[in-house]
Image (cartoon, grey):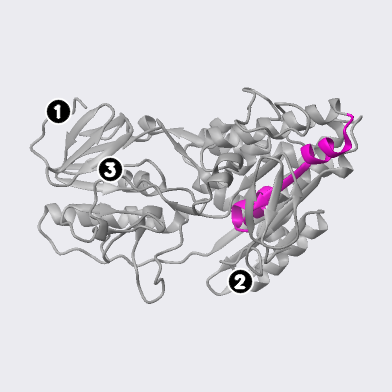
Amino acid sequence: MNIPKSSNPRIVIIGGGFAGISLAKKLKNKAVQVVLVDKHNYHNFQPLMYQVATGGLEPDSIAYPIRKVVQEYENFYFRLANVKEIDTDNNEVISDIGNLKFDYLVIATGSKTNFFGNKEMERNCMAMKTIPQSLNIRSLILENFEQALLTNDIEERHGLMNFVLVGGGPTGVELAGALAEMKKAVLPKDYPDLDVRKMEINLIQSGDRILNTMSEKSSKAAEDFLTNLGVNIWKNVRVTGYDGKIITTNSDIVFDSATVIWTAGVQGALPSGLKAESFIEKVERIKVDGCNRVEGYKNIFAVGDIAVMSSKEYPNGHPMMAQPAMQQGKQLAENLIRLVQKKELIPFEYKDKGSMATIGRNKAVVDLPNFHFHGVFAWFVWMFVHLFSLIGFKNKAVVFLNWVYNYIRFDREARLIIRPYKKKEVVSFTSDEV
């Protein structure tokens, strides 16, 4: 990797997500050498990816160059690489651009879509964990409407205009709300010769309520918002298969759809090389102690979505969200410096600042530790928190101006098919492609 030798201890961070960036910022100009490795050269603000997928924002509004984050840091290096394995015996990271020795390693590789072993769903569904995947969804949505204009087959047109979202968590709920607003205000203007009223948005949730990690009050408010927007919510329904055309479930309910977006779960993006007892195989997350040290190792740590820190309050680990990841990253930076200085480590304590989700224009739900509210004020709170959390003044300004423009005009102008998306499987009802 062509990293110069240093008299200071070398800390290697794998992953430039919320946890990795927070850790890197706190290690700025400390008496250590830091190497940050990521397969992308940008930090991706995942909470707003659904707006890229629905034409509300361009991808560069929610991405920020990692090199720009760390360009003024002393003894700090970034490498664009895909980590293949961790050689724990030799304290070495093995990647596609070479190997790198470390004194301390931090795994902050985040999460990936979890299809729970259903290969058919994995092959035919759309995922939304990366910016390229969001752009694929945006292209497919628009391509489906272009194709719907051309067909005279009623069943084919229904499938092209029927959108199914699997998973009623924040991502599924926010995406459903955005699609419903497109149906209401945007698509009728773009496609006046198409009866957009026949567009269907189906949200499938395997449990008995959507947003099941939030309060029942917020869950009920979100369901009411979506229902009023015309979204069909199917609870206690589990998807069992999707062949590219027909969705089967554990009941007698079936759906004809050319577009199925999977938001039903995530699992850790686990690098290979760790001992089997150091991670939970089912969810591919790494077991850590109260100081984020990987079980079975003295100099390897894990933070963010990839880490499972069991406690009385969180027996299955902290929520796989930005706040725990950022807090763990900051705390671990302090602990790594203390470790170098041969001081005692400080256990991590999660400060729950609440959770929130937006359903659309003037519609959001917010859960604070001792207070729950929804509606217009919650929507403004959601916007402020997300704007404040973006990296870079330009991104904050661009997103804010886009939101103001979209609010005034009730429009989403990033409806561009920059790169046409072609599904691998046959998704059309009469032809080989959509």
- 30 shown above or below 231: above
Q: Label 2 belongs to which residue? A: 215
Distance from the alpha carbon under mark 2 to that under mark 3: 35 Å
Question: Under tag 1, what secondary structure?
Answer: loop
Residue bounds of the magenta highlight: 152-175
Q: Label 1 belongs to which residue? A: 4
285 sits left or right of 191 in the view: left
Distance from the alpha carbon under mark 2 to that under mark 1: 51 Å
Q: Earlier in the sequence, mark 2 or mark 3?
A: 3
Three-letter code for the amino acid on which mark 2 is drawn: Ser
Question: Under tag 3, what secondary structure?
Answer: strand
**What residue sits 17% from the left and 52% below the top?**
299
Image quarter where the N terminus lies is top left
Residue 354: image location, x then y, percent:
52, 65
Question: Under tag 2, what secondary structure?
Answer: loop
Q: Earlier in the sequence, mark 2 or mark 1?
A: 1
Image quarter where the C terminus lies is top right
- 394 shown above or below 168: above
Which residue sits furthest left? Answer: 7
Three-letter code for the amino acid on which mark 3 is drawn: Ile
Q: Label 3 belongs to which residue? A: 13
